[in-house]
Amino acid sequence: MSYSPSLSSSITNTRMRTPQNVSPLSGMCATCSSNCPGPCEIGLSALRGPDAIYPYKADINQFASEKDYPLDFSSFNINGRVFGVHGTGETQEEATYPRASLATRIGKIKMTAPIILPAMAKLNWQDYYAGAALYGIPVVIGEDVVAKDPGLELEKGVVTKAPLIQEMVETFRRYDRGYGDIVLQANPDDENLKVLDYAITRLGVKSVELKFGQAAKGIQGMGPVKTLKDALRFDAMGYLILPDPKDPEVARAHEEGIGEPFMKIGKLPLWDEAFLIQRVEELRALGADQVFFKTGPFDPADLMKILVIASKARVDLVTFDGAGGGSGNSPTKMMNEWGIPTVEMGSLLVRILEKMAEKGYELPNVALAGGLVMEDDVYKALALGAPHIKFVGIGRGAMAAAFVGKETGDALKEGTLSKTHAAYGETAGEIFNQIRVLKSWYGEAAQSLPLGSVGVYSYLSRIETGLKQFMALNRRFTLDHIAREDLVPLTETAARITGLKTYSETALDALEKL
């Protein structure tokens, strides 16, 4: 069998001619016909060359790995208990799931749940950020926003005005109710342009994040540049543009439709420990209250080094994004075929953090992300990482909720509501039943909230309720009491990689005490 998908995908808008007969070894149709028009990945490559590496219509879609990993959270069940209570009074009135507490904090940020919404700066970011504010958790503005900002102003290669970042920050602040925060992420190109310095000193941003890489795309961003004018503009900003648009021969060839098209390629982070410690100090001196790191499922030695640097620099949170997740314009094969899957990476991080604790390191907060969508994923991730991994990242699920909320709102306005949605009512207040909860904080203004953001809030409220139910199932009523024994592996591979006990092993332990 093959864990990798065949050479077709909705991500690249390709398909197999004979999907029922595919060679597992190559991913090709078992019989490749001489009269095939080539709808598969190979056929797309024959037409589009290197462009075939990237997803189809990334401006309106988000993406994730299609690889069927041999180990994921479906290889575990959540344990349950009857006796005892942890984190609340042992009465039937107190020990009930709605009273379980998800409250937590990172630095000065109070949070309603141990969830962050990872970096996005595309698609329906407006409702993604606003929804985080409604719910009361941190949300991260993605890298490279300034490259998309028509109102950007630079002086001597440094940002002096970035209206798009300002709009993104204000989108969160408009609905801020004292929980969560809007976090600005920076890659090496952003750092060269001093984007974080501008945001902290001019916009009052209090939380920032340095990006090393992510799950779906361990390298930095890349994308085509269609015109010579834009290529020269990006080159003047300090971006790496290939081929060099300043070369007269390249420019002339481009105008004649000859040669490689221009590509804007993000610079790789070549940071070291000394630079990162100094940079974190600089950001705090500028006025940042929280400094985060964001990285992907790199070599385990690199993960350990990042955590050690984070400890020395007193970084507030490190988010590790496991293979299998994704959202942006990542090369499709990189999305499927690189990095440590989320479960295995979480297990490695626990071992690293335990060893660091033994050595006397001060441990940073850690968040685990990568394909986490529903409440069972959240509980399993927290249990796998206990007691060191205390936060999770949910990206694609929250953005999907923003899509649905906005589309439903638009359908209400246009009178095109589907029968499925109309079954819940005819008004926003009837269909979105969490609006009545939002009235508790926003009063009648809740009736006019963007419905995409209400969708995000409602989705996260569902996660909250399900998470509390799993906590009560294990008689754990605060986050600190969630434990690794709450997660039970169902396969030998899952048990071996995580070191967790199976049901049979747990039963033997109980029998020895009889």
Image: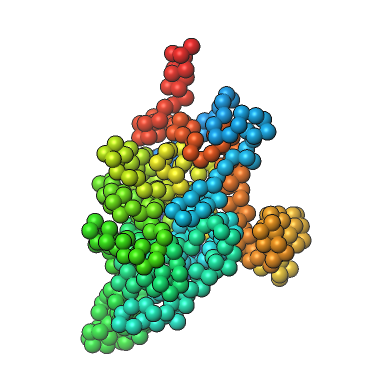
Which one is in front, 361 or 351? 361
Q: Check the picture and name the quadrant holding the N terminus.
A: top left
Q: Is residue 183 above or below residue 507?
A: below
Q: Position of residue 341 (x, y in %)?
A: 38, 45
Image quarter for residue 194?
A: bottom left
How many numbered marks appear? 0
Q: Residue at x 43, y 56 (%)?
A: 326
| Residue occupying image coordinates x 50% and y 70% | 168
- Asked which quadrant contains residue 344, the reply is top left
Is residue 8 shown left or right of residue 246?
right
- Nearer the observer, 263 or 379: 379
Residue at x 57%, y 42% (from the top left corner): 101
Which color scheme does this rendered protein use? rainbow
Q: Position of residue 191 (x, y in %)?
A: 32, 69
- Give the residue at the far right of this rendering: 426
Residue at the image position 54 percent from the left and 47 percent from the top: 103
Whether residue 318 is visible to the viewer of this picture, yes or no, is yes
Measuring from the top left, give residue 266's x and y in whole percent: 31, 68
The answer to whether 481 appears left or right of 257 in the picture is: right
The answer to whether residue 395 shows anywhere in this view is no
- Toward the top, the furthest residue is 514
The x, y position of residue 298, in whole percent, is 30, 51
